[in-house]
Amino acid sequence: MQDAFSIARNGQSKPATRAKTLGIRVSDSEFAALEQRAWRMGKSVTDSAREILLGEIQGTSPQATQMHIFTELVAVELALMNGLEPLLRGEKLSREQANKIFREVQATKATRAQEILLKRAQTREK
């Protein structure tokens, strides 16, 4: 993670020197959660927190990656649901029909993924 960020900042191939310190206050329970996450990653709390913060800046946070993967899984599900039904009825899909299904999936996958997550969140609240 530091490679691209450091190189972009100093224009050289070696990492930039870490000369600044950032301090934050957290509760005991927040620290415990950070500590557990760091241990699962095999890192120190400070290294883990640094990666999380810089990941947010660079748009490479685990949450963004997870959302991307979930959205693509929803796309696969939509393609299967839309494409398998006519095939199971014994019909054949033309190239144009398949392309139409793929275009529709690409256009709706993000919205559908958000709808699924919202529905699950509402179900948990009940």
Image (cartoon, rainbow, N blue to C red):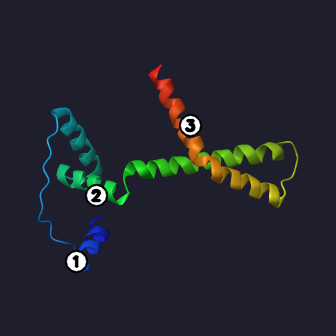
- Looking at numbered disc 1 in the image, what kind of residue is underneath it? Lys
- Looking at numbered disc 2 in the image, what kind of residue is underneath it? Leu
Q: Give coordinates of residue 119: x percent, y percent.
A: 54, 30
* Kind of element beneath mark 2: helix
Residue that carries the numbered disc 2 in the rendered image: 54
- Looking at numbered disc 3 in the image, what kind of residue is underneath it? Glu
Nearer-the-camera pick, 40 or 34:
34
Mark 2, Cα crowd under 10 Å, few <14 / some 14-19 / many 20+, is some
Residue that carries the numbered disc 1 in the rendered image: 14
Q: Give coordinates of residue 54: x percent, y percent.
A: 28, 57
Numbered disc in front, either 3 or 1: 3
Name the residue located 49 percent from the left edge and 26 percent from the top edge: 122
For the residues labelled 2 and 3, the Cα–Cα distance comes to: 29 Å
Q: Give coordinates of residue 32: x percent, y percent.
A: 20, 37
* Kind of element beneath mark 3: helix
Q: Eyeballing the image, is 53 above or below 6?
A: above
Name the residue located 38 percent from the left edge and 57 percent from the top edge: 59
For the residues labelled 1 and 2, the Cα–Cα distance comes to: 18 Å
Name the residue located 64 percent from the left edge and 45 percent from the top edge: 77
Q: Eyeballing the image, is 13 above or below 94?
A: below
Check contact, mark 3 vs mark 1: CB within 8 A.
Answer: no
Q: Earlier in the sequence, mark 1 or mark 2?
A: 1
For the residues labelled 3 and 1, the Cα–Cα distance comes to: 45 Å
Q: Earlier in the sequence, mark 2 or mark 3?
A: 2
Left or right for 30, reference 110: left
Q: How many marks?
A: 3
Residue that carries the numbered disc 3 in the rendered image: 115
